[in-house]
Amino acid sequence: MRYCVRLLALFLASSAFAADHRDAPSATADPAADINDVYTFVNPNNPAEVIIAVTVVPFANYNSRFSDAVDYQINIDNGAVNTRISCRFTNQSNNVACSGGGLSASGGIERTLQGTGMRLWAGLRDDPFFFDLNAFNATRAALAPRFTNPGSNFFSGNTLSIVLAVERARLNNNGANNVWRIWSATNRLGEVGISPGFTGLWYDAARPGFGAHIEVLAPATAGGPDQVVFAWYVYNATGQQRWITGVGSINGATATIPNAFYTTGGLFPPAFNPAQVTNRPFGNVSFRFTGCNAGVLTYSTTDPDFGSIGTGEIAITRLTSIKDQPCTFFSAGQIDRNGRPAINPALINVLPNTGTALKEAYNRNGDQSTWAAQFTSEIQSNLAALDTLDGIVGNAVLPPAPLAGVLVDDRLIIDTSRPTCDAYLAIELGAAGCGGRTLARDVIDDSFGALIGPGVSDNVANDSVFITDFPFLGRPL
């Protein structure tokens, strides 16, 4: 039992942001591209429509916005054709346009938009996901169960939502292709890398006493890259203080400064004479960042004042930032993907000291034909550990190997021909029901029951007040 509790603690540590909220570094750093959840069900008021809802931006508020530099994608595979619906935002994210596969709708956010083959709604809604994260964290800290009954929903709050009502007849091939596999992805197209928020002082935390000031500038010419000016407060080989400075251009996460220089010949004012100042070439300097608070300064010099130093790298850490100037560090390309809840958080890089590289690779892989080869082994090994958490081995719904084969295809599966959907994983596991995922369904308890054993629960029930018609998600809190 003690072994099981420890395994539970490991599982909880990896699932600090369950469902799909903040499940990898790039998604966490880019809230507008961070997918929380995907829901799909047949419209209970009109079985001719299939509802697909994608939520983004964890813990959103009334100031949260979709990004005009992110392509929000919804993929629908009916077994014959894979339809991708792309949603883009414009006009300071106050307008949305979604299209793909002959379906389209566009207009202002926070209203129902009637289009071709579908309806569309985008805006702030109550987050439907519910889970007792605090009880899980307490269990992790104590290495003993700390669940309460009832539990408390940590995710009580708001989220940004894109909701589609797709005319089923548009994609079911006259009834021949009623089973759909649905997943969502976000693809950042712009505003990547070094942003103005990188302006500030940076230093070598391992050897404090010298550092650099970085300032991000507008492009030198319209349409060109942003620029950076820097001053590196350092010493030469004989201990004389030198300020190495220069201006360069930004390309993504890297700023390159060719022909950096320093000055000699100056005197303290009023004896200062500009004519006596000499600019001396230092060499090349670049800054490469891995986030808003960490990076590497790389240099190359042939100046004899710096001896035989030549080239080198110095890790730098942020020391100061500009007041009221937030920093963003966005990566280009696919940032997040999600079909079923909690697959990446609970089944990828679960054990301590395994890092987040595979989580990142999981989110960035948009080629579903490669998912099985890349992630099945990882999922299977973690399923084997999860099966022991209730103290009973072998009572998961399937053994680890076949269950991993099911879950690695991270797409919600729904039989759109059946009007009542409220059985998560029904089609995948061969149970009765049309599958999909409804807003009120307790998918955490469903997942615990399938992965660990029957009866495992966080004792949290849905606390959202849904509306009875499109877009169905509850009004924001």
Image (spheres, rainbow, N blue to C red):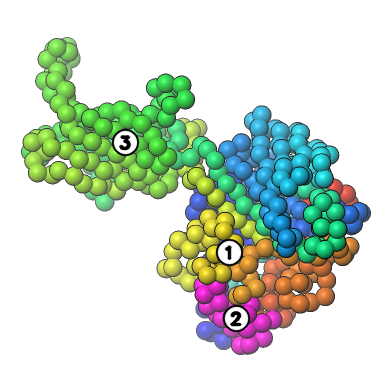
Q: Secondary structure at mark 1?
A: helix
Residue drawn 76% across the image and 77% down it: 430
Which amino acid, by three-letter code, is at mark 1? Ser
User: CB of mark 3 within 8 Å of CB of mark 2?
Assistant: no
Residue drawn 61% across the image and 75% down it: 405
Which amino acid, by three-letter code, is at mark 3? Thr
Which amino acid, by three-letter code, is at mark 2? Pro
Please name the residue that numbered disc 1 is placed on: 369
Quadrant hosting residue 12 = bottom right
Q: Secondary structure at mark 2?
A: helix
Q: Is residue 79 magenta?
A: no
Please state the horizontal and vertical placement of residue 226, each as a whole percent of the image.
42, 29
Residue range corresponding to the magenta coloring = 376-403
Q: CA distance from mark 3 to mark 1?
A: 38 Å
On residue 234, the disc is none
Please name the residue that numbered disc 3 is placed on: 256
Q: Nearer the viewer, mark 3 or mark 1?
A: 1
Q: Is residue 396 magenta?
A: yes
Is 181 situated above or below 467? below
Please state the horizontal and vertical placement of residue 356, each as a whole percent of the image.
47, 61
Residue drawn 78% across the image and 67% down it: 435
Q: CA distance from mark 1 to mark 2?
A: 21 Å
Closer-to-camera residue (243/53): 53
**Nearest to N terminus: mark 3 or mark 1:** 3
Image quadrant holding the N terminus, namely bottom right
Please state the horizontal and vertical placement of residue 124, each as a whole percent of the image.
72, 43
Please name the residue that numbered disc 2 is placed on: 400
Quadrant hosting residue 365 = bottom right
- Specify whether 362 is left or right of 443: left
The 10 Å Cα crowd at callout 2, few under 14, some 14 to 19, many 20 or more, is many
**Nearest to N terminus: mark 3 or mark 2:** 3
